[in-house]
Amino acid sequence: MGILVETTRPDPVIGMSDESPSLDFPEPEWERWYRMTPQERWGESEKLWEFYLLVGGSLDAEPDSQSPFDLGPPSGGVPADGRPGLRVLRRGGV
């Protein structure tokens, strides 16, 4: 009966060894991101959000017509006199 000996030491932060199997990533940046610690990813994400806001990005939610909470387009504007609008339903006497 043989004894199993671990030849690589896993990284204590992300649980990967330095000699992990090679994965095919479409872009080299993806592999770099995959190998970062969670703390490093958090820092990089902060930089990305800062840049996004700097170039005019917005954190406001975009309308979603598929959402059950979507109320449709906003109703018409407020009348000039500020009172609710009235519509004649029938003309003439009763």
Image (tube, helix red, strand yellow):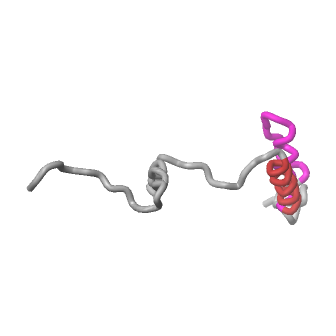
Highlighted range, magenta: 18-38
Question: Where is residue 23 shown, x and y percent of the image?
Answer: 79, 40
Question: Where is residue 66 shown, x and y percent of the image?
Answer: 47, 47
Can residue 69 be spotted in the picture?
A: yes
Which residue is at a point 90% across and 56% down the rendered structure image?
8
Q: Nearer the viewer, residue 13 or 67?
A: 67
Instruction: Locate the C terminus by quadrant.
Output: bottom left
Q: Main secondary structure of the magenta part?
A: loop
Does the magenta-highlighted stretch encompass residue 14? Answer: no
Question: Where is residue 43 shown, x and y percent of the image?
Answer: 88, 59
Which residue is at a point 56% across and 49% down the rendered structure image?
63
- 84 sits to left or right of 17: left
Q: Nearer the viewer, residue 65 or 1?
A: 65
Instruction: Locate the N terminus by quadrant.
Output: bottom right
Based on the displayed image, in which of its 4 quarters is residue 86 positioned?
bottom left
Which residue is at a point 79% across and 46% down the rendered structure image?
56
Can residue 67 be spotted in the picture?
A: no
Does the magenta-highlighted stretch encompass residue 29? Answer: yes
